[in-house]
Amino acid sequence: MQPQNPERRRLQLFPTVHGGRSAMTCMYRCGDACSHPVPNTSDNEYLGDVIAKAVSRRGLFKGGVTAGVVVGAAGALAAPAAAADADGSSSARWGRTPRGLDFEPVEPNREDAVTIPEGYEQQVVIAWGDPILEGAPEFDAHAQTAAAQAGQFGYNNDYVALLPHPESRRKKVLVANHEYSDEVLMLPAYDSAAPSEEHIKIGLAAHGLSVVEVDEDRETGDLTPIVGAPLNRRITAETPFVLAGPAAGSDLLKTSADPEGTTALGTLNNCAGGMTPWGTVLSGEENFNQYFANAGSVTDPVAKARLARYGLSGGASQRKWETYDKRFDLLQEPNEPNRFGWIVEVDPYDPEWTPRKRTALGRFKHEGAGPRLARDGRVVVYMGDDERFDYMYKFVSKHKMKTGSSRSAREHNRKLLDEGTLYVAKLTGDSPVEEIDGTGALPSDGKFDGSGEWIKLASGDTSYVEGFTADEVYVFTRQAADKVGPTKMDRPEDVEPNPKTGKVYVALTNNSQRGTSGRAAADEANPRNSNRHGQVLELTERWGDPTQTKFGWNLLLVCGDPEAADTYFGGFPKEEVSPISCPDNVAFDPYGNLWISTDGNALGSNDGLFAVSLEGRSRGQVKQFLTVPLGAETCGPVVQEKHILVAAQHPGELDGASFENPLSDWPDGPGSIPRPAIVNVTKEGFESIGC
Ligand code: FEO
Ligand code: CA
Ligand code: CA
Ligand code: CA
C-alpha cells in the first residue's frame, strides 16, 4: 500500500458537529436523540467502577483466549520506530498486503457521488421508488401515492443481504431494510405541521423491508431487479407480525386492536441485521420511540420511567402519524410502543410465513443481530443497543439447530430464537484505572484490553433480575439490565462474529457526552471523553465457545485522524492508514478481513466503507474502499468475493434541503431529487475483489 498523501488529506477534512450528521438526519432518523437527555440515568457504571477496581486481575484470559491480541501488542510497541523511518517503503516490514485488501484506497472527499478504487466498476441496483411487485408503477417523484409505494422499493435502505437464489445460479435474492422516511425530501408540498393522510400513508409504506429477486450478469456482475418475481415482497409499517417467544401474550403487549398481545402491525426503523444459519433474515427495530406521540402527558410514574428509559417524550411526533392512526398515540394505546424495539425474523424464501418479533432477544434500540452457531449446534446472537451509554447483549438458544432442508428442520429452526437465555455484557479493563485518563493515551501495557462477563437476565419464564418478572425483563430490557451493572458503552452498533476466526467485532460509533458532567467517565473499553470518532472492539469468547459467559477483549481501532495522538490502529503505522470516523456496521470478506461502514464522519469527509486487516503484521491496516454521496451514510455492507454492495442511505439529507430545494442529485443526475439506493461494486472483468 502506498502511504496516503497527508497534504491532500488535511485539505479535505472539515470538522463537523453531530458526528458529521446534519440536524435533518438527526431529526428524521433517530428523533433527535443527541438533543434529548441520555435515557440511561442509572448509576450502574459508578458501582461498576468500584467493582472493577476490586476484581481487576491483570491478564485474566491471557494465553489461549486472546491469542490475536499478542500480535496487536507487538505492533503497538513497534509503531513509533516504524513511524520515525517511514518513507513510503516501510510497508514491506509490516507484511504483504493481505488477500482481499489489494486495492488503491480512495481519498476522503465531499463529492456528490460514490467514489471507488481504480479498476472497479459501480452500478445502482435499485433505488427508492423502483417497482418490485407486479403492477407497481415506475417511480414518479411528482405523483407518489401510498398504493404505489407499497409495491415499490422503500426509502432509506440500510441493512442489505445478497443471498443465493433457490432455483437459479443466474439469480440472487436481495433483502433490504428501510429504516426511516424523510417526507421533506420525498414529497412535493409536504406540510410537516399538518401532513395529509395520503402523505402519512406513503411514510408508513416507505418503511420496513424489501425482498427482490435479481438477475446477475455473469460477465459484468451487474444485478438487475426482476419485477414481480415470486419471492418479491414488501413488508411495511402495517404488515402483520407474530409476537413470538416468552413475552408473547403478556399484558404488556396487549392493545385494543390486539387483546391477545400476539399480533403487531408493522416494523419500524429497521437498521442493521444479520442472516441466520438456517437462511432467515434478522432485522433490528432501532429508534422506534420517535413514532409515538404524547409520552409527555403520561402521569403514572412507573409508565413515565419506562417511557423515559426508551427515549419516549413530548407531545406530537415528528411525522404525526397519530393524527391518522391512534396506535401511535400513547394516551389511546399505551402499550403500542412495547410492540416495537424487537429483533424481527423474516424468511425471504417463504413469503407465506408471517414474520416474527422475537421477544426472547429483548427490547431495546436494536442496531442489528449477529448470529452464529456454537460447536454444539446452539445458536448465539450478538446485539448492540445503539444509544449513548447503553449495552451489548447476547442470546444463546436452548435448542440446537437441525441441519438439512427438510420441512421439519425448517420448522424447528424457525422456532430456535423463542427459547434461550438473554445476557448483557460487563467489561473490565486490566490496566490501573488511573492510567485511563480519558485522553485516549494508551495505558502502560500498551493496550486497551481486559476481560468480560455475560450476565444472565432471563431464560424462558425465569427472570434473573431482582424485582423484574421475566416478561418485564424482555419488554423493559434496558431497565432490567441497569440492575445488574453492565458496562455503559459508546453507542454499541453492529456486534458480529468473524466467520473465519470466531472473534466478535463491535462497532462503537461515538459518544460526545462521555465524561461530561454527571455522565460516566472514560473506562478502558470506552477510553476517550467527549468521544467524537468511536472505536472498534474485538471480543474473544472463552475457549472460542460463544455459549461461555466469560470473554477477553481489546480495542482494535480507536478511530479518528491518524495524525491525532488519541487514535490507535491495531499497532499499524498511522502514516499508512486511511482516516476513519464513526464506525457503524461491520462485515467480513471471504478471507477474514473486517469491513466497516461509517455513520457520520466527524473529520468532515463523506461517509465510507473501509477494509481492515486483522491478523499478522498488517493487523490494523485500514484502507478506504469507497465513499458515498454528500449527506449519505454508508449502510448495508455486503462483502463477497466478487460483489460489494452498499446502501447509500439519506443522500442529500443536509440542512436546508427539501423536495423543492434538493442539495444532491445522486443517483439520477441534474434536475432530479436524491434517492437512497443500493450500489453494486465489482472489479473490472468480474474478478475477485481486492486480489
Ligand atoms: Fe440506524 Fe444505529 O444506526
Ligand atoms: Ca490494558
Ligand atoms: Ca446502522
Ligand atoms: Ca447508523
Image: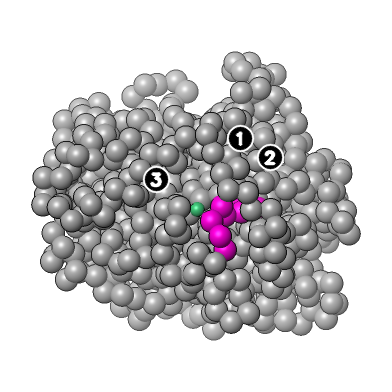
Q: Residue at x 33, y 35 (%)?
A: 616
Q: How many marks?
A: 3
Which secondary structure lies at badge 3?
A: helix
Which secondary structure lies at badge 2?
A: loop
- The answer for how far apart the CA atoms under marks 1 and 3 are is 20 Å
Give the magenta part as a residue range.
426-433
User: What residue type is disc 3 on?
Assistant: Ala
**In this view, 310 is above or below 70:** below
Q: Quarter of the image containing the N terminus?
A: top left
Q: Position of residue 609 (x, y in %)?
A: 32, 51
The residue mark sitting in front, 1 or 3, is 3
Upstream in sequence: badge 1 or badge 2: 1
Residue with the mark numbered 2: 549
Mark 1 in CB contact with mark 2 (< 8 angstroms): yes
Residue with the mark numbered 1: 542
User: What residue type is disc 1 on?
Assistant: Arg
Q: Position of residue 308 (x, y in %)?
A: 71, 73
**In this view, 453 is above or below 374:** below
> Which image quadrant is residue 440 in?
bottom left
Query: Is 428 inside the magenta-drawn segment?
Result: yes
- The answer for how far apart the CA atoms under marks 1 and 2 are is 8 Å
Q: Position of residue 55 (x, y in %)?
A: 69, 53
Residue with the mark numbered 3: 73
Residue 537 placement, left or right of 214: right
Q: Residues within 10 Å of mark 1 (few under 14, many from 20)?
A: many
Query: Is 674 inside the magenta-drawn segment?
Result: no
